[in-house]
Every structure is written in C-alpha cells, then in structure tokens.
Amino acid sequence: MSILSIASRELRSLFLSPLAWSILGVVQFIFAYIFLTQLNTFIQIQPQLANLDNAPGATELIATPLFATSAIIFMLVIPLITMRLIAGERANNSLTLLFSAPLSITEIVLGKFFGVLGFLVCMALLLALMPLSLGFAGTIDYGLLFSAWIGLVLLITSFAAIGVYMSSLSKQPTVAAISTFGILLMLWILDWSSSKVADANATGALEYLSMLRHFEAMAKGLFSSADLLYFIIITTTFLVLSIRRLDGDRLQR
Amino acid sequence: MTTPLLMNIEHLTREYGSLKAVNQVNFDLKRGEVLGFLGPNGAGKSTTMQMITGNLAPSEGKITINGIDLLDNPKLAKAEIGYLPEQPPLYLELSVGEYLKFCAKLNGIQRQKQVNAVNYAINRCGLGEVRDRLIANLSKGFQQRVGIAQAIIHTPSIVILDEPTVGLDPIQIREIRKLIRELGNEHSVILSTHILPEVQMTCDRVQIINKGQLVFSDSIDSLNQSMQATSLIARFENCPSIETLRAISNVESVEDLGENKVRLQYKTSPAKQVAIEAVNNQWGLLELSPEQKTLEQIFVEITSSEKLPEHTHSEDAA
C-alpha cells in the first residue's frame, strides 16, 4: 500500500518533469531510427534469404538487434532517470518526510524502485510496439520476441536497482548519475576484457559477471534459469544495499 | 502522577565521533502541552528533534511515545508524531492538494478518510486559496504552512516544529504563531526556536538546551514570575543625592547610572513614593519605569555562564 503510494508519487513526479518527457521523446526517436535501419537491411537481403534453408526470420533479424542496441541506450539513459531518486530528495531535504512517516526503509526503497521501474517498462513497451507492428505485414516469432523483451526488462530492472543504490550513496544527483553509469559500463565491458585475460578461470568468472552475456542469450530466445537468476541476484543485492545505506543515514552522519 | 505522559525521554545522547551533540537529556511532554525548546545555534536542538522523530538513531537513551518505544516499534510510534523539520520537506513539482494527499497516504490514512484529512489540514492552515497551485510557486510563508499541514494531517498526538518561523515576514510570523497556539488546543506541541518572544507568546513550558545539555526547564508562568521587575529606572532634571533617594521607604539600594539616571532596587515597588518626593522637592522627574528582566537576559545568563547553574526544576515542583 505505502510502497504503491511512493511508487505512484515517483512516477507522477517523473511525468511532471521535462526530463522524463525529453528522455522519452529522444530515446523513442533513436529506437525508431534503429528499427527502420534494421527493417531496411532486412528488406534488402530478403531475396537472398529466400534461397536459404532454415533462414533466419524477420524477428531474428530485426527485433534481436533492435533490442540489443536499445540495451546500450538504456544504459546511457537510466542513470539520468534514477539519479534523483534518493540523492535528489536528500538535496531537497524531503527525505525527512519519508523517514518521519510510519514507513520502513524497505518500503521507501522498494517504492522508489518500482516507481522508476514503471517508467522504464513504459519505455520498453513502446519499444516492443515497433517489432510487433510487423505482425500486420508478415509473421513474427512471438516466442522469440517475448523472450528478448523479457530479457531486456530484466536487464533494465537490474540497471534500475544499481541506479537506486548509487543514488542512495550521494547527495548530488549528478554524482549518482556518473557513478551509476560507471558501474553499468564496467559490468558491460567485463565481457570483452575477459578475452584478454590469460587465466581460464578468471575469464569464466568475468564472463559470468558480464551483463551482456546473460542478456544476449535471452535476446536470441534462449531463456535459461541461470540468466534469470543472475538478474534477480543483481537486482536484490543492490536493493538490499540501498536499504542498508539508507538505514545508515539514521545511524550516523 | 495522574496526568498521562505523552512522551518520555530518558538519557538521550547523540555522539558524532568524539563530539557529544546531545548529552544525557531527559524530559517529558504532557498531553495538550506546548513545550518551547530554546537554545543558541548549534546547541543540539535540531539533533534532539531528529532523534525524537526517528530521523536519527540516538547513541544512547530511550524515547517513549504514548507508551510505545520509538526504537523497538518505530512504525507505531511514528504514527503519533507529526514533524516539520527546519526545511519543510516539500515536493515542489506537486500542487498543495496532491502533496497533502500523498502525505495522507504515507501516513496510512484509509482511502475513504483521505479527502477529509486533506481538507482538515488545508482548513486548519488556511491553505484553501492555494490548494491547486504548485508548491514551487508559493511564497515562503505558504510553503511553511504546507509544511505544518503535512505535520498535522494524520492528527498526531504530538506535533514537532523545528524553527517554523525562520525566514518569514512579521505578518506571517504572527499568523504562524497564532496557528501554533491553536494547534496546542488539540495536539501537544514541541516548538524549537531561538526566537525568545515566540516562546513567551506560544508556550506553556520552556526548556533551554546549551552545548547538548538541558540547562533549564520551567513553566512559562513561573518564568514570568522570576522575570518580575525588582528595580526601577528613574531620570531627573535635578538629580538628588544617592543618600536622599536611599532614604525613601522600600528602596533597598541605589545605583548611579550617570546622565542623571539612577537604578533603584526594591522588594515592593517605591514608585509612588519616588514620584511624590520628586514633585515635592522639584527634582523634575523625567522618567520612571520598572526594569523588567527579559527572557532574553535569563537566556543569556544561562547559556553564556561557564558552569551550568542547577536551575532545572523537577516536574513535581512545576
């Protein structure tokens, strides 16, 4: 109940700010551009595909790369959306309102997290509409599309959790944004840095940690519980850390 | 003691590293009482407020609100408290109505009662005309009132206000003080401030905190008693000698202040006698006024003395 009210307030404030609208507008434009480029490529190579046995379908050639590129855009944009969650309230002194109300820290953190997640899922839904629109013209692989979309949502869920945590660390939203971006980028590039490490064990560990690996599998339609678990672990870890950090506000300053 | 204590604070201590911001503070709050919490800047007022509202964990001590321990059962205890911190915790992008609705939800007011609660707070704080305006566009005075509205929306038994009149113009200050006085009829109020007349005007009891320690606690009535005048200031055109003045009945001692001004110490006022003598002897009386000890003087005496006077009255005495 109180989680829901915090979440809806967060969502409301987001939609009242020009930041959210400009992000939605700009990102949507970029998504559309990528989508059209992919569609164009597909149409160009379609005659050759017809000669192939077991040729990849439209979904595989359009939706998968679209979602993969959008993941990078989400990585750039999510720090800007999550930065104000706690840091902004701290700077604005409005965090006291939540602390003084009969709420637990867990409820505060979850409320904020779900509020921002609501916004991000809206973005992801708008994105999903593009490949879905192909359904009017031809057949699409709904299973693959769904798996890739769920993968994307899981990815942005963990991005958001990391953003919430970084926001809980700082008083300045910009600092929160930069550090969130740093962590996201780090988790991203772990993958290609892993190939440069000689030790095979280390390579495996780095690859496992990389978000890209887990997302790629899902984007290709390979829905494995290991990947699901990876995202759930990342999300819970950072949410628990945020709760602990915010509780620390009360204990010492 | 038959009057139920609403809030009981024992050995409250808060350390920041080696600095003791609040040191072994004990006090109670009775139902329907307006308690003024005075102290110079940095004395530990806000720290104490933050602790009793659950915003800051005490290093040591116990806070009981309406019989509920704040540290053991924060959710229940916090429901009894409304808090306006130094900076009102507002969401500037929301309208007054939306903001208060959100506060009502946060405080767990049931859906059907939310509208009533919002209306109650809006009426109480005179926010009717700005209900649909954005908080960001309101004046400081109105923002402060929204802050108070937020603190009373769930009709808590204790309202805690931390320097509510800072940064307001004189008219707004008067309005806010009147509002605080009115709140005292329905809630217990703790008012933290460093503005002394504010305390004299609005509070039933005064506490002074200095360097983290409670150094004074008394009811405003007995405080007014101790502020009773014990001296007269008189100014004459032709000042008589000190001895002549000393001879007037009831005058205990005379002090020459220069420029034909004297201070007359007394136990029962000799003003009438002085006036009669002055007229009879043609001293040319220009000024005769009782010298009142202000709260300010008491405050300065208490907070500036090196060793702390044992002025703290016990509750039974008050």
Image (cartoon, helix red, strand yellow):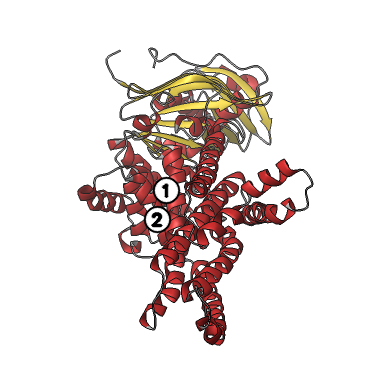
- Residue denoted by label 2: A9
User: Is residue A34 depicted above or below B248 in this figure?
Assistant: below
Q: Would you place residue A62 above or below residue A234 in this image?
A: below
Q: Quadrant of the N terminus of chain A?
A: top left
Residue B49 place in picture, x, y as percent: 49, 33
Q: Chain of mark 2?
A: A
Verify CB contact (< 8 Å) between mark 1 and mark 2. Answer: yes
Q: Quadrant of the C terminus of chain A?
A: top right
Residue at 52% x, 62% y is: A219
Residue A111's tag is 1
Tag 2: Cα neighbours inside 10 Å, few (<14), some, or many (≥20)?
Answer: many
Q: Pick whichever, B175 or A226, lies toward us.
A: A226
Provide the secondary structure element on which disc 1 rests.
Answer: helix
Q: Is residue B132 left or right of residue A16?
A: left
| Image mark 1: chain | A
B79 sits left or right of A174 in the view = left
Q: Amino acid at mark 1?
A: Gly
**Residue at the spot 36% in from the left edge and 81% down from the top edge:** A136
Q: Amino acid at mark 2?
A: Arg
Q: Nearer the viewer, residue A230 or A55?
A: A55
The residue at 54%/45% (across/down) is A234
Front residue of this view, candidates A190 and A220: A220
Vertical relation: B111 (above or below) A59: above
Mark on residue B262?
Answer: none
Residue A64 appears in the picture as rendered: yes
Q: Is residue A1 above or below residue A250?
A: below
- Where does residue B182 sit, x and y in percent of width and height? 31, 42
- Mark 2 element type: helix
From the top left corner, tell me how far across and down residue B142 is, in percent: 42, 56
Q: Say which label, 1 or 2, has the lower sequence index.
A: 2
Q: CA distance from mark 1 to mark 2?
A: 9 Å
